[in-house]
């Protein structure tokens, strides 16, 4: 039977029963009076029983109408309360948030403070670096480094932080290869590259809006800018690093910043998220929470 009854019919009947007026019920529901009358008529027709007695002076419920009202009132109230609760939950930062991100101290600190702020949230965080293909499988948000343009995808990319970069090497290494220090010759020089992040070995350079990639060779591949810097300080090869982490070493003469006709693309931390509405609020809340001024 319930599959034959529509919710608007019951809501119209409830309102008419309580207000004893089709006109007032229509005003309360924000519907035309004809709609409310039709709803009640369809309900009576489906149940095959008279629910309301109508006269020119008054309206009163029949015995069946009174019984129906008594039975549906707590059910409609429970349904309304349940829907209100679900709606409220959808507007709150709660549920299960699955994040993939680099293992950076500043991110760890901010993620902890975010979860403290939203105690109804459950977090699963994987600290790893993965190739772009299949990036967001199983995750609501992925934080990943990149250089240069972004590949086309169905995911939304948000830039969180940008670091200008530089190619560096020890003075000894620069002296050894000083006759071959050109952008084109980098492919023949020992370089320090990433293992899987940033698409591996290609180094991306820019000249205005034009970019170019150089596939350097490497015997030392790591997924950490700090490890790459230590390798560069040890003379293992040329490295492309954010200026911020090697500025002091350049000032002290431990590393030399090389100048070419093109400059390295900035290192950018991107946040990749899907377009799923059910996860948008918790993802947006985390993105709004992240700040990088003190990195």
Image (tube, rainbow, N blue to C red):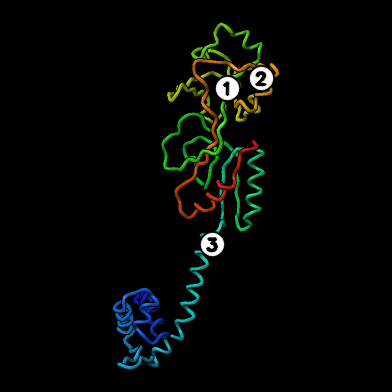
Q: Are the residues tagged 3 and 2 within 8 Å (C-beta)?
A: no
SS type, badge 1: strand
Whole-number angstrom distance, CA of label 1 to CA of label 2:
11 Å
Whole-number angstrom distance, CA of label 3 to CA of label 1:
47 Å
Mark with earlier residue (3, 2): 3
Residue count near mark 1 (Cα–Cα under 10 Å), binned few <14, some 14–19, many ≥20: many
Mark with earlier residue (3, 1): 3
Q: In the rendered image of this protein, does residue 85 appear above or below residue 262?
A: below
Residue count near mark 2 (Cα–Cα under 10 Å), binned few <14, some 14–19, many ≥20: some
Asked if one can make out residue 1 in the rendered structure from this viewpoint, the answer is no
Mark with earlier residue (1, 2): 1
Quarter of the image containing the N terminus? Answer: bottom left
Q: Which residue is mark 2?
A: 250
Whole-number angstrom distance, CA of label 3 to CA of label 2:
52 Å
Q: Nearer the viewer, residue 9 or 198?
A: 9
Quarter of the image containing the C terminus? Answer: top right
Q: Which circle marks residue 166 in the picture?
A: 1
Q: In the rendered image of this protein, does residue 184 appear above or below residue 209?
A: above
Q: Report the residue at 51% width, 34% height from top.
A: 131
Front disc: 3 or 2: 2
SS type, badge 3: helix
Q: Which residue is mark 3?
A: 89
Residue reaching furthest to the top: 179
Q: In the rendered image of this protein, does residue 35 appear above or below residue 155?
A: below
SS type, badge 2: helix
């Amino acid at each position: 039977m319930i599959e034959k009854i529509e919710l608007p019919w019951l809501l119209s009947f409830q309102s008419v029963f309580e207000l004893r007026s089709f006109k007032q019920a229509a005003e309360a529901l924000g519907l035309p009076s004809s709609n409310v009358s039709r709803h009640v008529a369809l309900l009576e027709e489906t149940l095959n029983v008279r629910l309301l007695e109508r006269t020119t002076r008054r309206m009163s419920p029949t015995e069946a109408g009174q019984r129906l009202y008594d039975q549906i009132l707590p059910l409609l109230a429970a349904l309304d309360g349940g829907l209100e609760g679900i709606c409220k939950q959808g507007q709150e930062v709660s549920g299960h948030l699955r994040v993939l991100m680099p293992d950076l101290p500043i991110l760890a600190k901010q993620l902890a403070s975010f979860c403290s702020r939203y105690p109804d949230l459950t977090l699963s965080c994987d600290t790893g670096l993965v190739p772009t293909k299949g990036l967001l499988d199983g995750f609501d948000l992925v934080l990943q480094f990149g250089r240069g343009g972004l590949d086309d995808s169905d995911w939304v990319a948000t830039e969180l932080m940008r670091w200008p970069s530089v190619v560096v090497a020890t003075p000894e290494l620069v002296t050894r290869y000083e006759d071959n220090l050109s952008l084109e010759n980098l492919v023949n020089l020992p370089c320090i590259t990433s293992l899987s992040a940033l698409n591996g070995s290609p180094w991306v350079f820019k000249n205005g809006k034009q970019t170019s990639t150089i596939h350097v060779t490497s015997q030392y591949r790591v997924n950490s800018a700090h490890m790459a810097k230590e390798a560069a300080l040890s003379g293992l090869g040329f490295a492309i690093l954010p200026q911020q982490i090697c500025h002091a070493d350049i000032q002290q003469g431990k590393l030399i910043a090389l100048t070419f006709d093109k400059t390295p693309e900035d290192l950018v931390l991107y946040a990749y998220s899907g377009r799923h509405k059910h996860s948008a609020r918790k993802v947006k809340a985390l993105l709004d929470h992240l700040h990088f001024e003190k990195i």
